[in-house]
Image (cartoon, rainbow, N blue to C red):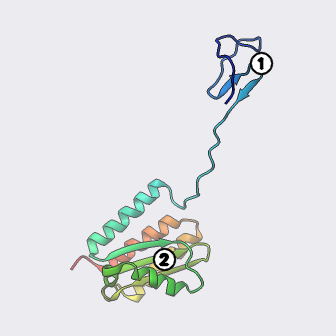
Amino acid sequence: MATGEITGEDRSGGDQDLAPGEAVTATGRLSIARRIRPEGPHLPFSTGQLSRLDEALTLASRSTGLEFAVYLGDLGEETRETAGELHANLGARAADGVLLAVSPQQRVVEIVTGEESKRRIQDRSCQLALMTMVASFKEGELIEGLLSALRMLADAAGNRR
């Protein structure tokens, strides 16, 4: 803690308007304290994009009765097995689940379906959705690829039964 006198006079000899965090010491030296905020983590989506993704997931799930989910991150060496484990994390909804697992760093995309969702969404529809995602990802459009694939898969599944 510093000691000194707080006065209204400027000890440096001139009239100064001091900004927050600035002080003139008893010796006339200007002392400045600034708050430095570290840069936060870089997230792949903006708040608006996350909102669009959430809306697409909700709409796809409500209209079809299936449980749609997206995973974005590293899938490890055994990508298909890891995606299957993530799909199993849907718990009781796994049979109705559709997981889009994307690992941008590995350049891998996996679509995993449960028993009921596989019956309603044919492999050909999954392949088309996957090709759509890959084409969008190549253009740097991660969110657009996910949204397009969700729409395609929801359309292929049809309405809630």
Q: Which of marks 1 and 2 is in front?
A: 1
Amino acid identity at mark 2 = Ala
* Relative vertical location of residue 11 with respect to residue 84 in this rendering, above or below: above
CA gap between label 1 and label 2 equals 62 Å
Q: How many marks?
A: 2
Secondary structure at numbered mark 1? loop
Camera-side residue of 66 and 5? 5
Residue occupying the point 63% across, 38% down: 35
Amino acid identity at mark 1 = Gly
Residue occupying the point 67% across, 16% down: 5
- 24 vs 80, left or right, is right
- 83 vs 78, left or right, is left
Q: In which quarter of the image is the N terminus?
A: top right
Q: Position of residue 64 (x, y in %)?
A: 28, 75
- Upstream in the sequence, badge 1 or badge 2? 1
Q: In which quarter of the image is residue 70?
A: bottom left
- What numbered label is drawn on residue 28? 1
Q: How crowded is mark 2: few (under 14 residues within 10 Å), some or many (20 or more)?
A: many
Residue occupying the point 52% across, 67% down: 142
* Relative vertical location of residue 14 with respect to residue 159 in this rendering, above or below: above
* Relative vertical location of residue 3 with respect to residue 66 in this rendering, above or below: above
- What numbered label is drawn on residue 101? 2
Q: Position of residue 23 (x, y in %)?
A: 68, 23
Residue occupying the point 32% across, 85% down: 95
- What numbered label is drawn on residue 153? none
Camera-side residue of 4 and 88? 4
Q: Where is residue 3 in the image (x, y as percent from the top left)?
A: 69, 23
Q: In which quarter of the image is residue 92?
A: bottom left
- 43 vs 99, left or right, is right
